[in-house]
Image (cartoon, grey):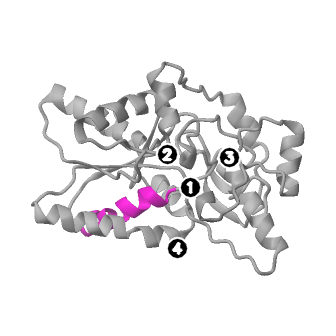
């Protein structure tokens, strides 16, 4: 689709940057990651004085921009006289989750409502659930400034799950801080459960969700089933941050039984965290 309007698209890791070339030399079938794509984009911008690069997630100004999502949701809920008991957002770099949750968090801190706020991340890339809170690079090559965040290590290469937007080794500093203070909670879910929830959602609502928000859908279904068993009534709010019309190959894999869950070993996490800089006090 991008090429229809004149763009040239390179799969990351690519042959057009030195960093991409070095990764492909070691592994011609390298699965790539968001961290690698960021490294390649930064290197391209640095090499060309006429090029500028704007990061689309993680950083504070992006999260602030995205809060229009939550502000609109607050107004929509007010029109029907509802407040959420649980707010669930898929979480990769943090912008979508923060965009929905931060306005509600403001209201929670003001005492006007008291929702549980939950980050949901892939089991194959659980930066909050299994990562460490420390200073690390935002990209794989170590070209970006160090930021304090939950991280699996900038050298961590996530398994090639279908939620590409969640395959990021770190988490927004603001979201990481909130998790450390206990204002938000986190859980990780495997992609088969997520796509199972996506199918249920699509057949109920008529919308095929993108792989990323299926994580929030799966968590919401878990909560709804708990409420069904206990008899408790809860209002659950999720953000559907995209449709899956460009991800139908992933749905085909799920429907044909070819999709697999990836088990993330503690050894893989430890090896990646060993590369994280150690800062002296």
Q: Earlier in the sequence, mark 1 or mark 3?
A: 1
Residue 246 got which mark?
2
Q: Earlier in the sequence, mark 1 or mark 4?
A: 1
- Sort mark 1 into few (<14), some (14-19) or many (20+) by Cα contacts within 10 Å: few
Does the magenta portion include 109? yes
Residue that lies at the very extreme toward the bottom in this rendered image: 50
Q: In this rendering, which labeled residue sits more in front, label 3 or label 2?
A: 2
Spatial CA distance of label 4 from label 2 is 28 Å
Q: Callout 2: few (<14), some (14-19), or many (20+) C-alpha neighbours within 10 Å?
A: few
Relative depth, front residue between 203 and 266: 203
* Disc nearest the viewer among 2 and 1: 1
Mark 2 and mark 1 residues within 8 Å of each other at the beta carbon: yes
Secondary element type, mark 4:
helix
Our reading of the magenta stretch's main secondary structure is helix
Relative to 143, 167 lies left or right: left
- Cα distance between the residues tagged 1 and 3: 21 Å
SS for callout 2 = loop
- To which residue does mark 3 refer? 33
Q: Which mark is residue 1?
A: 1
- Marks 1 and 4, how far apart in space? 28 Å
Is residue 276 shown left or right of residue 231? right
Q: Is residue 239 toward the left or the right of residue 59 in the image? A: left
Q: Which residues are magenta?
A: 94-110
Instruction: Identify the residue shown where x is 64% and y is 34%.
Output: 159
């Amino acid at each position: 689709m991008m090429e229809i309007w004149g763009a040239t698209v390179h799969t990351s890791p690519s042959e057009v940057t030195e960093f991409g070339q070095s990764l492909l030399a070691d592994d011609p079938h390298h699965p790539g990651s968001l961290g690698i794509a960021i490294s390649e984009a930064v290197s391209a911008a640095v090499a060309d004085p006429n090029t500028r690069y704007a990061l689309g997630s993680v950083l504070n100004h992006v999260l602030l921009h995205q809060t229009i999502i939550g502000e609109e949701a607050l107004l929509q809920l007010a029109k029907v006289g509802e407040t959420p008991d649980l707010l669930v957002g898929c979480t990769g770099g943090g912008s979508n989750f923060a965009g929905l949750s931060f306005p509600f968090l403001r209201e929670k801190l003001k005492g006007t409502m008291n929702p549980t706020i939950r980050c949901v991340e892939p089991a194959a890339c659980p930066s909050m659930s299994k990562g460490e809170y420390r200073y690390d690079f935002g990209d794989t090559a170590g070209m970006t400034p160090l930021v304090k965040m939950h991280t699996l290590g900038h050298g961590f290469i996530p398994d090639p799950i279908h939620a590409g937007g969640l395959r990021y080794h770190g988490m927004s500093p603001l979201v990481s801080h909130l998790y450390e203070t206990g204002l938000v909670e986190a859980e990780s879910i495997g992609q088969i459960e997520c796509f199972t929830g996506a199918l249920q959602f699509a057949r109920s609502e008529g919308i095929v969700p993108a792989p990323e928000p299926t994580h929030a859908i799966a968590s919401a279904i878990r909560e709804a089933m708990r409420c069904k068993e206990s008899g408790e009534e809860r209002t659950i709010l999720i953000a559907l941050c995209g449709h899956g019309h460009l991800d139908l190959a992933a749905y085909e894999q799920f429907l044909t039984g070819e999709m697999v869950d990836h088990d993330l070993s503690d050894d893989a996490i430890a090896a990646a965290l060993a590369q994280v800089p150690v800062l002296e006090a």
